[in-house]
């Protein structure tokens, strides 16, 4: 998925991808090659991938190589994050409404999050 998003981009997460490479092209590339790394090892073969604009696709990919690698790093999910907390600290608990309200005030948030926090607090 990270390779797909690095090529096609993801507007929700502000990942630009390669200009002119959409979802269909990214999918075809990754069906033909195993990964972004494989694509860049075989740029001369990109023109043979059955997609519109394949003749110039290799040049586009070469031009945006650094961007694609950065986008892939941004779209990867990192699950090896050290957590220095006891299981008790990680247990679900009622929110500290005073601290949340202070945070919401600092951030300029309105009443919707405050009501949600109150509903969560009321459920305990």
Image (tube, helix red, strand yellow):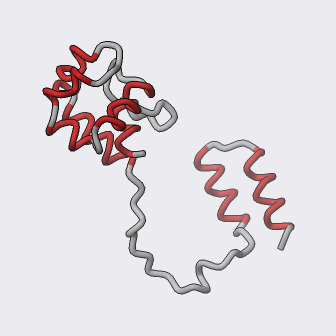
Q: Nearer the viewer, residue 97 or 88?
A: 88
As drawn, is 20 to the left or to the right of 89?
Answer: left
**Residue 65 position (above or below residue 87):** above
Q: Is residue 46 above or below residue 70?
A: above
Question: Is residue 87 rendered to the left or right of residue 99?
Answer: left
Instruction: Write down the quadrant of residue 79 in the picture.
Output: bottom left
Kindly identify the residue that appears in the image at 44 percent across and 80 percent down: 84
Picture coordinates of residue 12 (x, y %)?
A: 51, 34
Rendering coords of residue 89 (x, y %): 59, 81
Q: Residue at x 80, y 67 (%)?
A: 121
Residue 50: x percent and y percent? 33, 21
Q: What count of labels does the image hold? A: 0
Horizontal side of residue 12 vs 91, given as left or right: left
Q: Quadrant of the C terminus?
A: bottom right
Q: Residue at image x 17%, y 28%?
A: 45
- Taking the view exactly as shown, the residue that stands out farthest to the right is 122
On the image, which quarter does residue 87 sit in? bottom right
**Which residue is at a point 83% across and 60% down the rendered structure image?**
119
Q: Quadrant of the N terminus?
A: top left
Q: Is residue 67 above or below residue 24?
A: below
Q: Position of residue 21 (x, y in %)?
A: 36, 23
96 is higher (above) or lower (below) than 78: below
């Amino acid at each position: 998925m990270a390779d797909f998003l690095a090529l096609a981009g993801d507007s929700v997460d502000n990942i630009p991808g390669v200009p002119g490479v959409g979802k269909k092209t990214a999918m075809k590339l990754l069906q033909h090659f195993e990964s972004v790394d494989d694509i860049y090892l075989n740029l001369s073969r990109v023109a043979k991938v059955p997609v519109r604009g394949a003749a110039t696709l290799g040049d586009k990919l070469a031009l945006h190589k650094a961007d694609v690698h950065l986008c892939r790093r941004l779209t990867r999910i990192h699950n090896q994050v050290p957590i220095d907390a006891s299981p008790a600290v990680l247990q679900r608990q009622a929110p500290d409404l005073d601290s949340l309200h202070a945070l919401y005030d600092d951030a300029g948030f309105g009443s919707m999050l405050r009501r949600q926090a109150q509903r969560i607090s009321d459920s305990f």
